[in-house]
Image (cartoon, helix red, strand yellow):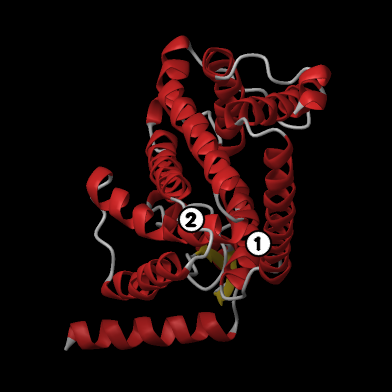
Amino acid sequence: MQSMAASSSSSRGWAAVRRCPSPSLSARHVAFSSSSSSRCPVAGAGAPVLPLGIRGGRLPLPCPLLPPGGKNGASARRATAAAAPSAEGDGKPEAGGIPRTLQLGAMILVWYLLNIYFNIYNKLVLKAVPFPYTITTFQFASGSFFITLMWLLNLHPKPRLSLQQYAKILPLALIHMMGNVFTNMSLGKVAVSFTHTIKAMEPFFSVLFSVLLLGQTPSLLAVGSLVPVVGGVVLASMTEVSFNWIGFWSAMASNVTNQSRNVFSKKLLADKEVETLDDINLFSIMTVMSFLLSVPLMLYLEGIKFSPSYVQST
């Protein structure tokens, strides 16, 4: 009974205090709440202080819906703001996709037109000067001149390779030179149209060398697309009026050398030791090396056939 009376008296006392709070009691309560909060640190340091109105006290509580405060909070907000645009852009297509495709299509069209003009004019030159090794050497010489000019004017970065890397490119340069020689030999013997009909077999040799040298397995669709190509070349060879075995086998040898060069070039560009070498510089180095290799071959097989007096006599 005494305990019940004490509890009832204490509750009546707290009710009186709540109705008429004294300054001393409020001060003691604030001091108690601040001291208890210092003894009991709250998890989530740096969290915002929320006014909760708990009898005049302010208790720091972590809020998962608000960003953290302090230096860490500022850096987190900056990182979130920086990541927001990139996240929005991930779902959109690239802005330069269509212009890049149009540019690639225009480059292919220009290459095709220039290739037609080159072959027709090359046929006219071979009729006037029927020396394929000499013509090939002059073609590589002109290419080496423009490549040197490109590097001197810094239109493209110069390659920085070691002697071992140049030694790896040397076989490609030899194959590149022989491919151009065989093409000129074929153009000198048969019609331009027939030479390029035979050279339409290049995709066949490209797939063949990719399987043999790179271990790549073509799809059935790719293999099936080669059937009409091979059949068309066979049919054109059987009905060609200007058919010549030297021209035919020269064009076939050109297919073999050019496609083996392409496959080996792809394999070389994938090599980690020459990762600083791009495709433009690789083709440029092959052209310069091919010129240096073709000069002694031209002098040995055909001699000096490019003097004005010799051209006039022929």
Sort mark 1 into few (<14), some (14-19) or many (20+) by Cα contacts within 10 Å: few
The image quadrant that residue 157 belongs to is: top right
Quick check: 96 left or right of 25?
Answer: right
- Residue at image position (70%, 44%) is 122
- Residue at image position (37%, 53%) is 206
Quick check: 191 left or right of 120?
Answer: left
- Residue placed under numbered mark 2 in the picture: 199
Residue in front for this viewpoint, 101 or 293? 293
Mark 1 belongs to which amino acid?
A: Ala
Residue 60 in picture, x, y percent from top left: 51, 62
Residue 112 in picture, x, y percent from top left: 67, 59
Q: Is residue 203 above or below residue 138?
A: below
- Residue placed under numbered mark 1 in the picture: 81
On-image quarter of the C terminus:
top right
Quick check: 83 left or right of 157?
Answer: left
Sort mark 2 into few (<14), some (14-19) or many (20+) by Cα contacts within 10 Å: many
